[in-house]
Image (cartoon, grey):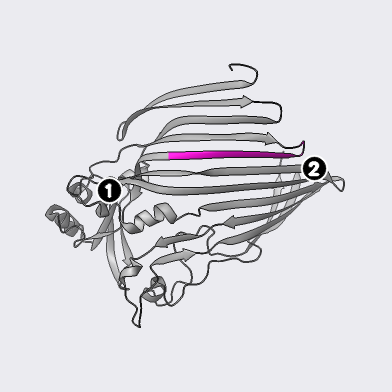
Amino acid sequence: MLSDAWNVSGALRYEDFSNAGDDIIGKVATRYEFNDDFAVRGALSTGFRAPSLQQSGYTAFTTNLGSDGTLSQSFTATTGSAFPAALGVDTLKLETSTNYSAGFVYDVTSDLSLTVDFYRVEIEDRITLGSLLSADDVSFSPEAVAALQATGAVQANYFSNSVNSTTQGVDIIASYRTDLFDGNFSATFAGNLNETKIDSVNAAPGIPKSVALDDIQSSFLTDGQPGERATLTFDYERDAYSAMIRFNYFGETDVKYFGNDHIELATDGSFKATSTVETAVLVDLNVSYEINEMFSLSVGADNVFDETPDELGDDEVLNAISNGAFKYPLRAVPYGFDGRSYYAKLSFSF
């Protein structure tokens, strides 16, 4: 603490992973209070993430639905095995990141507070699971073709440190609390705007970047999650009763899927080039009653109005190749497609 108003903190850490490498990371953070109601803050830090066990050791055979509607055997290869090694991926490295944030805290009144934080996260050597590759996709490498054929599968994929990316955005939180009808009322808004961009693709010399990260996987990284997300929550407590209503807003996702734009409709025209999940607002409700000091009862419903993504149309490839077996999009669906659910809960504390 440099003064009563200015606080500066720092940290440093070293870790060594036998299979992924070592790194030194650190953080410097500061906060300055102009007065009792307003303060600014910021931080600069570095970070890392070691490959998970599933990423470094997972292998499996699966049966996949191809873009032509047929089933084919697929194989997920462990990093360093023959197939990824032939494509220049012998091991997984640490993901590393540099993180920046700056914002402020403002107590507008004794009942209302506001926080705003801007952030930027730069990730190097980000680990992704690549798209399934066929012999045609890797025909430039006889070693890779032979390794794929040796698995007995038609196509294979693997994890790799394929991409460097940057995510930036802003978090906004506003909270209001007051007395109302002999009870306590509060309202909280939490919102986020974000954007992810791919800075570069990491491919071994002689390996096409489209093998390391194709357009479909790139689309999921940049557009597979909403660029806008917000919640508005109202809580009320009086005596033994409490109630909550929450509005959950999800922005749109729009991703490439199955190489849609390369498949022709049987009739005139083409399938939609992307799979879109529209914006939505889901509403949750909860009512609780404190029976005594030990027991409380809660009943509620999530997604009260049974909000689901729009159903697949005739111009969407997933509907066509599955012959209508799938009702909704399968990926980049941030709020799911299960619809409304109810619950009742009896809690015991001691």
Quadrant location of residue 148?
bottom left
Mark drawn on residue 168:
none
Span shown in magenta: 109-121
Q: CA distance from mark 1 to mark 2?
A: 56 Å
Q: Is residue 204 left or right of residue 288?
A: left
- Which element type, helix, strand or loop, lies under badge 2? strand
Q: Is residue 241 left or right of residue 21?
A: right
Query: x%, y% of residue 11?
Result: 48, 23
Can residue 291 be seen here? The reply is no
* Type of the residue with mark 1: Thr
* Type of the residue with mark 2: Thr
Viewer-nearest residue: 293 or 87 = 87
Tell me the crowding category of disc 1: few under 14, some 14 to 19, or many 20 or more residues within 10 angstroms, Cα based: many
Quadrant location of residue 202?
top left
Quadrant where the N terminus is found in the figure: top right
Q: Is residue 244 above or below residue 101?
A: below
Report which residue position mark 1 lands on: 78
Report which residue position mark 2 lands on: 178
Tell me the crowding category of disc 2: few under 14, some 14 to 19, or many 20 or more residues within 10 angstroms, Cα based: few
Viewer-nearest residue: 3 or 321 = 3
**Secondary structure mostly seen in the magenta stretch:** strand
Q: Is residue 68 above or below residue 218?
A: below
Q: Residue furthest left?
A: 142
> Which callout, 1 or 2, points to the residue nearer the camera?
2
Quadrant where the C terminus is found in the figure: top right
Q: Earlier in the sequence, mark 1 or mark 2?
A: 1
Residue drawn at x 27%, y 51% as measured from the top left: 212
Q: Residue furthest right?
A: 182
